[in-house]
Amino acid sequence: MHRSSRRQAIKLLAGVPMLPLAGTTAASLLTAFAGPARAQSATFATATFSSMPAPTLADPAAMATTTIGSTLTVTMSDSTTHQFKLAYQPFFITGDMVPDGKGGTILAGGYVDIDNKPIIDKSVASKERQIFSDGPDGTSLLALPDAAVPGIKGKPVFAVVQFEYTSGDQSGARTYGTLPSPIAVLTLDQDQSTGKLTLAKYHNVDTSKAHGLWITCGASLSPWNTHLSSEEYEPDAASIAGNKIFKQFSRNLYGDETKANPYHYGHLPEITVHPDGTGTVVKHYCLGRISHELVQVMPDSRTVLMGDDATNSGLFMFIADRPKDLSAGTLYVARLGEGFSIDPAAPGAALTWVKLGHATSAEIEKRADTLKTPDIMAVSMTDPNDPSYTKIFANGEANWVKLNAGMEKAAAFLETHRYAYLAGGSMGFSKMEGTTVNAKDKIAYSALQNMVDSMVKTGKGWNAASGVALDKPLVAGGILAHNLAGGQKDTSGAAIDSEWVPVKTRMLMVGEDIPPDALGNIAAVDRVANPDNLKFSEKMRTLFIGEDSGTHVNNFLWAYNVDTKELSRVMSLPSGAESTGLHAVDEINGWTYIMSNFQHSGDWQKGLHDKVKLTLDPLVRANYRDRFGAAVGYITAEPTSIKISQS
């Protein structure tokens, strides 16, 4: 290729979503873009994904691993198109020994205690080993301008990966929630010719100053380039004495089942990556103690919209006092107006916002250190027949609560679910999970993994005050779209200092419950079911959707174009596995990335997997360490599929 043609090609590529090429140089691609028929003014126009069929038992191997059959088509302003067949590239399978950057190796997904010593699985005699996770989840990919990591041949890029849990020990005993969640910083060597990422260093973040981490689920990248983690299913402090899972968590973390404090968990950890590929954590205590699935910071670097993965969950918003600083701010909960419907054709319902309080992280952590539930409020699970108590619903159960005088701030930030109900928030959603934003259109999206229980009239935890009243459950769930605007006031009449406040919500799409099909699916296979991870690509105008489905035999990763309304199945995960770790990165050093992990492959559910388990279980076990392993990786483009056409 002539040098001038190459320069022209690179100029054209500057605005194009370029997925990393698997194992080759970009020469053929540059040649295609620099052909003589290309107008010099051609620019990127659109990106679309073809939809792959769902795998079946006609190809059991495809059901037992990550399978991609989608093609990305990039259309330029001169109507030329460029096609890329997609593939999946893991960095590692948990349980691998990977480079530690010091000339040695370290266990990927390995668990450590408060002193950073390995936690050992001793459940089977003579098979003792360090426990590692089968539940990689939230992932952020980022670059630093001053990165300097020895041994990098291309450019250093970093991924922060958190591990939510591990399903069981070697004896088969369930271990969910009993281990402190590790978080790792991966240093990746980015090949500048292909965009390929190769793991060069794995660093475990020391979480001891944050009291360890609890069930880290989804994550997002902040506008200031930090990893915003999560702590899901906050342990109920009011009933902690009988919580066997929390006692085991405390034993694994501290060596003492009584030492861990429930009020230290259910908050927002923030990971800062350093130029040498290490990382540090700060836990923020002022964003509400809820079932943090993940948060999405708006482009103002102050407004934070939060997923709340619980029964009787709410839509929460935090507005920081200062940009790029989550250490102080104001917490709100949404109140739903009339007209809420799960029909995507319905106009939607208004949202107003109830102020719960203002706090700094430091003052709430101090209160968490010293307070117990009775210091904040009285909580009874049975009716005390005392009019000074108020009946509310939390986690699907009736509670009778009485707030202690002067404890409003402590309640708002440490007993957030109960206090938000008392304050008049709409606490009637079920499993509000992933949250993301389409900044151009000022629309945020929230996943409802299912719509059951507290969303259904007469369902567990249902309350008319929530404004949600479905006639019947929709197990397959759906996705909400929230219109964002400025100039809003809270329910007390005070101004809300943000231009990114959700003011109206409607259903973008819903799944469809069906009778069991030939494979066992109980939700329509060609529609999204049980959405969980959500990430939006501004460049591609695409909402990526990862499933956490108890209704699809295989979970899928989908791409939804918000302009064409086209929904495409991009990837199928191993049967029984959940799609996790989703992160759409429009550009790092000229390359576009779609990060994707999975967890708990072969998590067979009675009824759903009865028709496939016998065939698939040995394949899944062979692929993923007897079902103890799971993949952390990303989507690549196969260069042999590059095709140029003129339409």
Image (cartoon, rainbow, N blue to C red):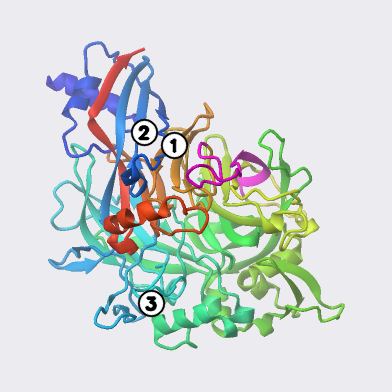
Q: Nearer the viewer, residue 330 or 194?
A: 194
- Residue drawn at point x = 25 percent, y = 34 percent: 638
Which secondary structure type mostly characterizes the magenta part of the structure?
Answer: loop
- Residue drawn at point x = 22 percent, y = 26 percent: 29
Residue at image mark 1: 569
Residue at image mark 3: 208
Please report whichever mark, 2 or 3, sits nearer to the chain's N-terminal start. 2
Report how far apart the C-alphas of labels 3 and 1 lie in the structure: 40 Å
Looking at the rendering, which quadrant does residue 452 occupy? bottom right
Q: Amino acid at mark 3?
A: Ser
Q: Which residues are magenta?
A: 498-526
Q: Say whether residue 274 is visible.
A: no
Q: Which mark is residue 550?
A: none
Residue 51: give x, y in percent of width and height.
42, 32
For this view, does 424 lie left or right of residue 39?
right
Report how far apart the C-alphas of labels 2 and 3 lie in the structure: 43 Å
Residue 538: give x, y in percent of width and height.
45, 36
